[in-house]
């Protein structure tokens, strides 16, 4: 399977990225895959390869390219619970610097780049994300309803906040089908209710599901949060969503 390390031109420089796609010479639906807060690393490259094996061109950007190429901070090979406080301490300023304005500028650049790749079909794309990346996927889809037909977020963060531009307040702009797979404790019941009501009011086809027995980060095999059965459940939800919404013509 072909893979590439790429440089995406953006308004603020060049974002390094990883791409994986099938090796047969036809055009494929595009998927923009946003990493979790730990960023672009082999774990996310493996997820891109898995999706590419199912017939998609998958682009995974380095969210923190303004601070340097991935990995921007040194990560342990396996992120245990004992590692998380120190790792998050180093990540916090990177996450805080990733403002909504930057997110939207980057989304423009990522979608433009994805659509220009010769291996990518002309139809709509999917935007998926993990943790922090789920909010980025939602923001990308609300800013580009003409381009994004599917949104999936797993163990999402920052999707329901008190901010006036919280992603859940913007879903009226969506034209995509949405699935959110939550760990237990990711969102309060009140926040889940707010999210359901916002999506229902906007007429968005959606599902919000708590994956039983999981903790935040359950899809990531390089962390202590990993849950193999929940990872499979995530594929069981994600792959049919992409198949329903993205054209292979």
Image (cartoon, helix red, strand yellow):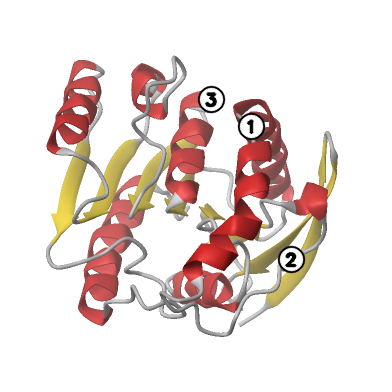
| Between discs 2 and 1, the one toward the N terminus | 2
Read off the residue under disc 3: 143
Residue in the picture at 80% in, 62% down: 69
Name the image quarter holding residue 172: top left
Name the image quarter holding residue 26: bottom right
Q: How crowded is mark 2: few (under 14 residues within 10 Å), some or many (20 or more)?
A: some
Q: Position of residue 79 (x, y in %)?
A: 49, 77
Q: What element carries label 1?
A: loop
Q: Is 14 rendered above or below residue 89?
A: above
Q: Is 244 rendered above or below residue 60?
A: above
Query: In screen coordinates, is 213 left or right of 21?
Result: left
Read off the residue under disc 1: 99
Q: Is mark 2 on a helix, strand or loop?
A: loop
**Nearer to me, 109 or 229:** 229
Q: Position of residue 178 (x, y in %)?
A: 30, 40
Q: Is 169 rendered above or below residue 161?
A: above
| Between discs 2 and 3, the one toward the N terminus | 2
Residue mark closest to the camera, 2 vs 3: 2
Return the mark for residue 188.
Answer: none
**Nearer to me, 104 or 110:** 104
């Amino acid at each position: 399977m072909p893979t590439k390390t790429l440089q995406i031109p953006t308004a603020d420089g060049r974002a390094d990225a990883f791409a994986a796609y099938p090796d047969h010479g036809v055009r494929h639906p595009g998927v923009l895959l946003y990493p979790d807060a730990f960023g672009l690393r082999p774990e996310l490259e493996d997820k891109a390869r898995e999706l590419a094996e199912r017939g998609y061109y998958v682009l995974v950007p380095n969210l923190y390219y303004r601070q340097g190429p991935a990995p921007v901070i040194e990560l342990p090979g396996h992120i245990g619970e004992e590692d998380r406080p120190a790792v998050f301490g180093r990540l916090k300023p990177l996450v805080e610097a990733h403002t909504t304005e930057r997110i939207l500028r980057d989304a423009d650049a990522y979608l433009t780049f994805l659509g220009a790749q010769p291996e990518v079909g002309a139809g709509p794309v999917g935007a998926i994300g993990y943790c922090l990346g789920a909010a980025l996927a939602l923001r990308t889809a609300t800013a580009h309803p003409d381009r994004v037909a599917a949104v999936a977020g797993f163990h999402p963060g920052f999707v329901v906040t008190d901010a006036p531009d919280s992603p859940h307040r913007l879903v009226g702009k969506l034209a995509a089908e949405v699935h959110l797979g939550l760990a237990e404790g990711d969102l309060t019941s009140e926040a889940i209710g707010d999210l359901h009501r916002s999506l229902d009011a906007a007429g968005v086809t959606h599902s919000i599901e708590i994956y039983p027995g999981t903790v935040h980060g359950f899809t990531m095999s390089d962390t202590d949060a990993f849950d193999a059965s929940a990872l499979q459940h995530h594929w069981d939800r994600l792959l049919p969503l992409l198949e329903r919404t993205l054209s292979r013509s």
